[in-house]
Amino acid sequence: MSEELFARRTFLQVAAAAGAGAALGVPRAASAGAAARAQRAAAPEPNGAGVRLGVASYSLRKFPRAKAIEMTKALGVRWINVKSVHLDYDLTPEQIDAARKEFTDAGLTIVGGGTITFETNTDDGVRRYFEYAKRAGMPVMVSTGAPDVMPRVEKFAKQYDIKVAIHNHGPEDKHFPSPYDVLKLVKTMDPHMGLCMDIGHATRAGADIVQAAADAGPRLFDMHAKDLKDGTAKESQCVVGEGVLPIPDLFRQLQKQRYPGYVNLEYEIDENDPLPGMQRSFAYMRGVLAGMAPSTRKA
Amino acid sequence: MSEELFARRTFLQVAAAAGAGAALGVPRAASAGAAARAQRAAAPEPNGAGVRLGVASYSLRKFPRAKAIEMTKALGVRWINVKSVHLDYDLTPEQIDAARKEFTDAGLTIVGGGTITFETNTDDGVRRYFEYAKRAGMPVMVSTGAPDVMPRVEKFAKQYDIKVAIHNHGPEDKHFPSPYDVLKLVKTMDPHMGLCMDIGHATRAGADIVQAAADAGPRLFDMHAKDLKDGTAKESQCVVGEGVLPIPDLFRQLQKQRYPGYVNLEYEIDENDPLPGMQRSFAYMRGVLAGMAPSTRKA
């Protein structure tokens, strides 16, 4: 049996089991219309565990778009969260169309954009990013900004039917150091408003990332994956699997809560030669998912 | 909790569970005296699953001993199976002592040697390799040779209390293409005689490596790990985790049968620059073991 077939079969088993869990009250993704449906419709990562791995293109910020696309393909990844360095906010609609075609022609799917900073609390200042995201086909905007801009962002998120995943940036972030700071804000907002948990920054802010994923439940829209040798030190970032973050427990929790988003590797180190460390990070994460997946062998 | 602590705690849980299995008749390692005891006494790989990953130094055959030691350390591995290119058969006993010290000074443990070919069916021809292995502190000799030399090898294995793990080399091997060809020979021999299953060659020879591990039971002394994109093509060797071999199922089986040996990566490709692919292979295998390990979180 091929690995692909193996993975598909296992995914169905996992999905069936998770479906039973849902009936028992396991939280499900907030329904946010077309965006959520499109996200759910995407194929699973062929890993048997139903957790989908993508690339946050910030990892490839030193390389132009074409090279970043080539590198993402070399990683065996089909999902990408696009940073503005690879899709400038000032492009014309036609330029955005052409850029989007570059991604899709390479077999990649843009699963989100960001991190986007809402720096101006005016309709025009917020609308421009939604126009950008809509044109680029982004179902999720990983975002940040002052809390007082967020009600206006919420209004546009509903209008455009695009999810906004507010990103926590660790102790230095005066608005959203921890995922819980995001959750506190969004819990009373429209279901289009949620969290992009950066697991490195979350850990540095003192959050238990496994518990935080569970607590976020359907508000967890996106994730930035990384690892730290020292859970308190930003400079200790390392290849995923070589640090202290509890990746297997996190993935088990994501599987349990049927996380519908992506785990996007944001590899901030080795910026001029990120591929070797990214390959090792994906190898580890894929290994974890393969180790978690139930065997399909007969007993 | 540190990963190391996590791993130790989990290992104890796994070991306890496996102990219960042993009472129910799960096969255990053949008792082969001091060698087996020394092997069991070694610390577990800190992965929570009790499967220990090492390097077969044949992977590093283009590099001299000092460099091979440095590369093994860079892989975060402490166990090494030493090929003659890194420890020549013609060294004097004192030279072997000095070489062995190079490994131990670097924090490495020689867990075996080989693959060693018994090419001469005489006492002197066989004894020289046992003298070599004894001086080098090898508890296991990964070996091959014509079947008719093996009764003589058995005699020395008992005398020297060193295990002999006969290596299967795939369809081209006229004596031992499949692990089952080895098992057929050794099943009536002394418990010092067993198998080093090369999982790539075994797959090419048509063996189901998971079933073969189970069938070998206590005769499984050592293992050469690799992966193939195509289970029938020697030239398709690839980074472990990127091929078709059922690594997670294999590791689950090893855990189940309390395999007391090592899974030694024999990475035969990229011979002039093997480290990147070896790093990815270890990242994947460690991920699998981490994904298999039970969570230590409270429910």
Image (cartoon, coloured by chain):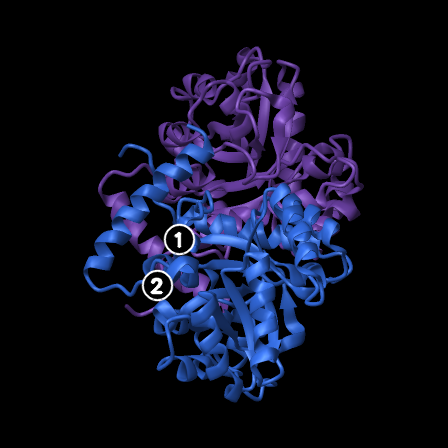
Chain colours: A blue, B purple
Chain on which label 2 sits: A
A138 and A184: which is toward the camera: A138
Question: Which residue is tagged 1?
Answer: A40
Q: Quadrant of residue B191?
A: top left
B55 and A154: which is toward the camera: A154
Q: Earlier in the sequence, mark 1 or mark 2?
A: 2
Question: Which residue is tagged 2?
Answer: A29
* Outermost residue toward the left in this view: A24
Q: In the rendered image, which quarter contains the N terminus of chain A?
A: top left
Image x and y of residue A290, in percent: 44, 46
Residue at disc 1, secondary structure: helix
A167 and B67: which is toward the camera: A167
Q: Is residue B162 left or right of residue B237?
A: left
Q: In the rendered image, which quarter contains the C terminus of chain A?
A: top left
**Where A156 sits versus B6, above or below?**
below
Q: Is residue A61 left or right of residue B24?
A: right
**Where B155 sits versus A223, above or below?**
above
Image x and y of residue A126, in percent: 57, 77
Residue at x-position 67% and y-position 47% = A102
Check disc 1 and give the amino acid type.
Arg
Q: Quadrant of residue A226?
A: bottom right
Chain on which label 1 sits: A
